[in-house]
Amino acid sequence: MTTRPTRLCWHLEDVLPLAEHALDAPERRITRAQALAGSAPQPALIWESEPDNDWLGSNGVPLCTPPAPGEVTR
């Protein structure tokens, strides 16, 4: 049985484009936390987890797609 980490970290250069997307997107999907709080959609990063994988996403619409291999983003 694999032990899950108690602390997760992402590199800033990986997270910054997602945060920028959440801020710049013309629309946003409401997150579960915002729905439970009765809040309007705000820019957010969404942490998703499965037993063998964790990842971050943006709640911005249209969805953020990862760059193609070799593509330079700014």
Image (tube, rainbow, N blue to C red):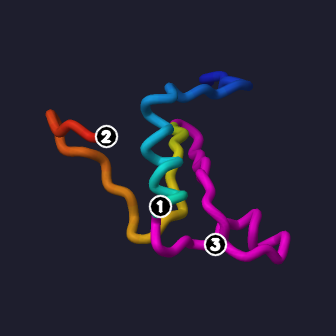
Q: Residue at x 17, y 39 (%)?
A: 71
Q: Which residue is mark 2?
A: 74
> Percent x, y for residue 73?
27, 40
The crowd level at tag 1 (other Cα within 10 Å; few <14, some 14-19, many 20+) is: few
Q: Which residue is mark 3?
A: 30
Q: Is residue 5 magenta?
A: no
Q: Which residue is mark 1?
A: 24
Q: Is residue 68 above or below residue 36?
A: above
Could you tell me how far apart the alpha carbons at marks 3 and 1 are, in whole angstroms?
15 Å
Disc number lying in front (3 or 2): 2
Task: Tell me the quarter of the picture where residue 35 sits.
Answer: bottom right
Left or right: where 40 falls relative to 45: right
- Residues in magenta, as a range: 25-52
Q: Is residue 13 above or below residue 44?
A: above
Callout 2 amino acid: Arg
Callout 3 amino acid: Ile
Could you tell me how far apart the alpha carbons at marks 3 and 2 are, in whole angstroms?
26 Å
Is the residue under label 1 in contact with that under label 3 (CB below 8 Å)?
A: no
Q: Residue at x 57, y 45 (%)?
A: 50
